[in-house]
Amino acid sequence: MNVSGLQNLHSIMKPINTSPSAKPYEGQKAFSAWLNESIKNVNQAQIQSQIATEKFVRGENIQLHDVMITAQKASVSLQTTVEIRNKVIESYQEIMRMQV
């Protein structure tokens, strides 16, 4: 994975900046903003992959390895997002099973 791929992955996984004394709604707003930004990044990677593939199919000046790298970046971003979603759902379900 090249440097830009690592930066993209880091941007998806970067922590949410909230202070320890933050109010719950502030945490919710920060998480919502982070989640929206992450989904936009994944969507942008998918769009870039589609554009590169279309250029290659039309015979424009783009190398096959560039198309494959772009497609893999999009795939890894999407898989990471799906796994994070699965973990969030699993955590939510575990919390709902707790007895108070």
Image (spheres, grey):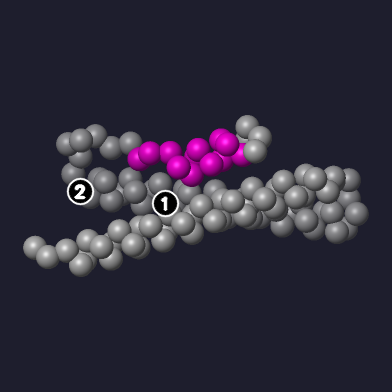
Residue 5, disc: none
Residue at position x 35%, y 63% from top? Answer: 89
Which of these two is toward me, 21 or 68?
A: 68
Residue at position x 49%, y 59% from top? Answer: 82
SS label for mark 2: helix
Residue 35, disc: 1
Residue type highlighted by circle 1: Leu
Residue farthest to the left, as pictured:
100
Q: Position of residue 8 (x, y in %)?
A: 56, 40
In the image: residue 64, left or right of residue 6: right
Sequence-first tag of 1 and 2: 2
Q: Which residues are magenta?
A: 5-16
Which of these two is toward me, 65 or 39?
A: 65
Residue type highlighted by circle 2: Pro
Q: Tell me where residue 90 sits by quadrant.
A: bottom left
Instruction: Characterize the local packing of mark 1: few (<14), some (14-19) or many (20 or more) Cα atoms within 10 angstroms.
Output: some
Q: Which residue is mark 2?
A: 24
Could you tell me which quadrant the C terminus lies in? bottom left
Q: Position of residue 96 (x, y in %)?
A: 21, 66
In the image: residue 20, left or right of residue 7: left
Q: Is residue 15 magenta?
A: yes
Residue farthest to the top, as pictured:
3
Residue at position x 89%, y 45% from top? Answer: 61
Residue at position x 88%, y 58% from top? Answer: 58
Q: Main secondary structure of the magenta part?
A: helix
Q: Is residue 70 magenta?
A: no
Instruction: Characterize the local packing of mark 2: few (<14), some (14-19) or many (20 or more) Cα atoms within 10 angstroms.
Output: few
In the image: residue 68, left or right of residue 47: right
Q: Position of residue 52 (x, y in %)?
A: 76, 51
Q: Is residue 12 above or below residue 84?
A: above
Mark 1 and mark 2: Cα distance apart in space: 16 Å
